[in-house]
Amino acid sequence: MKQPMIIQGGMGVGVSDWRLARAVSLQGELGVVSGTGVNSMLIRRLQLGDADGQMRRALQHFPDPSIADEIIDTYYVEGGIGPSQRFKRSSLPSVHSPLALQRLYVAAAFVEVWLAKEGHGGMVGINVLEKLQTSNLPVLYGAMLAGVDHVLVGAGVPREIPGVLDAFVEHRPATISVSVTGATDAVKVSTSFDPHAVMTIDAKRPLHRPIFLAIISSSTLATHLVQKATGRVDGFVVEGVLAGGHNAPPRGPMKLTDRGEPIYGKRDEADVDGIRALGLPFWLAGSFGSPERLAEARALGAAGIQVGTAFAFCDESGLSKGLRDDVIARWMMHDSIPSEAVFTDPLASPTGFPFKVVLLPNTLAEADVYDARPRKCDLGYLRQLAVRDDGKLIYRCPAEPVKDYVKKGGAVEDTVNRKCLCNALLANIGLAQRQEHGYEEQPLLTAGDDLASLGKFLSDGRDHYSAHDVLSYLKSSVT
């Protein structure tokens, strides 16, 4: 398979959905759907009436029709729920997720990849966060059922994922370890997925083994994966600290600038020479969204670049039109977006990883909007498994109600300024939950430092741009 020169970054939840991935793939580069929260995306689209019919149409091609029918019967609402009604939720992910949730994950990932790949031979990948260990297995299997070409995994050490892909090729069960906060070496927890126990499959027909790309920030991790992964590692996306979403924490003790952002130093810069010496293809990411930086990356031996922020605000992005228009209008009003508009927040994410936040009014980035939200954990993607002093395993999230988190053995200081990314990111794409007592979940926008350069796509008074415009710009100096 031809290597892409440009990888469209996987942006969750649903910012890089099937429409964006398809648009990029049709242009000969790697379009990537996000595998985060796909179950909630599917069932909320169905509850809104699936106006264009795409969710139901894709489900008609799911290999097990009984599962597709069950999902539609459970969640589809003709004409959509009313504006004051709440979305029906699925179960929360867990080490032993119920069968209905596993089926929903498989089907939802299938839908995203199938729609992105429909009717053409371009490359489509799926991006998952290693930290979402309790949901990744069924998501990856569903993506492979739809013929996904690449799997990209970041936000952790995805050592076990290559072996999972190898097992799923032959529809064999797969197991991965689950991290447990506060556990001793004697406490080992794992989660498994058995395709045969979840759905009816044609075991005689093997699946395509996707190319596996690990998203890393250091040559040390790259070397570790090459030597210790449970299967073949095919390449790397080398992500710097200027990229949007989650960033790797600084090495050593966390120190902050006067503005409150993590301080990164030389030790946090990827050793490109060391990564190149491994002999595998790699792509550079983190403010590489320009023709000049693409040329720079290729001169360093990279196959190309990964770009997220520029695609996040294009026409095909899953980001709600209101948020896209707001950001673009602010750029046009001031003829620029200051670099200070993006804040690397060391506390926002329940994962403990620094998280890039766009300081946009009427979002959780504003203190009063954050303070007005009743703390609640009802989606659970970022819940962490922990062991209490009495040895009992429990799930907890630093963004849940403080009294609940502390009761489960968590430290109260870990709850300060933690934001419910699960609900906020769904709000980003127009799928906000209306909670009890009428509270509507608010968005929290993330972007890389390249947000300040958005104007290169808005010349001549244009107030929007396409994925094609981004690719044409990036490749304008390629010969």
Image (spheres, helix red, strand yellow):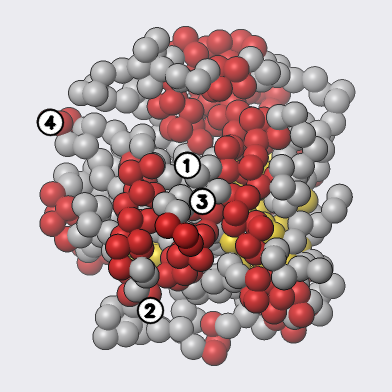
Q: Which residue is mark 3?
A: 465
The quarter of the displayed image where residue 376 is located: top left
Q: State how far apart marks 4 and 1 are (Cα).
A: 28 Å
- Residue holding disc 4: 437
Q: Which residue is mark 2?
A: 262
- On the image, numbered disc 1 is attached to which residue? 318
Q: Which callout, 4 or 3, points to the residue nearer the camera?
A: 3
Q: CA distance from mark 1 to mark 3?
A: 14 Å
User: Mark 3 belongs to which amino acid?
Assistant: Tyr
- Residue at figure coordinates x 69%, y 79% from the top left: 296
* 1 vs 3, front mark: 3
The quarter of the picture where the C terminus appears is bottom right
- Residue neighbourhood size for the residue with mark 4, other residues' Cα within 10 Å, grouped as few (<14), some (14–19), many (≥20): few
Gap in angstroms between the C-alphas marked 2 and 3: 33 Å
SS state under label 4? helix
Give the image quarter of residue 428. top left
How many residues crowd around disc 2 within 10 Å: few (fewer than 14), some, or many (20 or more)?
A: many
As measured in the structure, the alpha-carbon distance from the residue carrying label 4 to the one carrying label 2 is 37 Å
Point out the tag, 2 or 3, that comes first from the N-terminus: 2
Where 298 sits versus 164, above or below? Answer: below
- x, y (%) of residue 137? 62, 40
Task: Pick the residue in front: 69 or 303.
Answer: 303
